[in-house]
Amino acid sequence: MTQDNLAASHFQNAGESYAKYRPTYPSELVEFLASKCQQHNLALDVGCGNGQFSSMIARHFRQVLATDVSVSQIENAAPAPNIRFAVEPAERCSAEDTEPQSDCRCTGCTLV
């Protein structure tokens, strides 16, 4: 099993339960992060899981790129017009190739 497969396997079949039972983030945290950015064009959420944090930060940015290694997590993310979800590992993030320079880079699970 490769490192990517190992990381994805931890949540591969739990996306629906994760989306249903995982606590959300405090809105004050999102507002604080957004206030520290000079521009609000692009936020990058690495390890986004089911996109809970991505949805919150999307209220403050024109675009959000939300990535996770788990297909199940991404499949259970709530779509939004300004969020692009991608199944990919953090170390091979497509933001560097396809997106403008990000104004905010974060991973929600390390913020609380």
Image (spheres, rainbow, N blue to C red):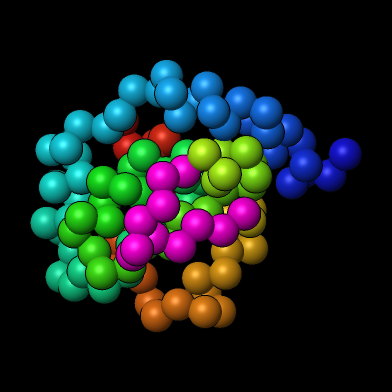
User: Can you see residue 10?
Assistant: no
Per the image, is 86 magenta?
yes
Image: magenta residue range: 77-87
- Image height of 104 relative to 56, above or below: below
Image quarter of residue 38: bottom left
Name the residue: 77% across, 42% down: 5
- Image height of 21 relative to 78, above or below: above
User: In screen coordinates, is 66 left or right of 88?
Assistant: left
Q: Position of residue 22 (x, y in %)?
A: 41, 23
Image quarter of residue 93: bottom right
Name the residue: 27% across, 56% down: 58
User: In screen coordinates, is 64 left or right of 97?
Assistant: left
User: In screen coordinates, is 93 left or right of 102?
Assistant: right
- Image height of 83 relative to 76, above or below: below
Name the residue: 45% across, 62% down: 84
User: In screen coordinates, is 9 left or right of 80?
Assistant: right
Quarter of the image that includes the N terminus: top right
Q: Position of residue 87 (x, y in %)?
A: 62, 54
Of residues 46 and 83, the one drawn nearer to the viewer in this rendering: 83
Q: Position of residue 6 (x, y in %)?
A: 76, 36
Per the image, is 18 magenta?
no
User: Can you see residue 59?
Assistant: yes
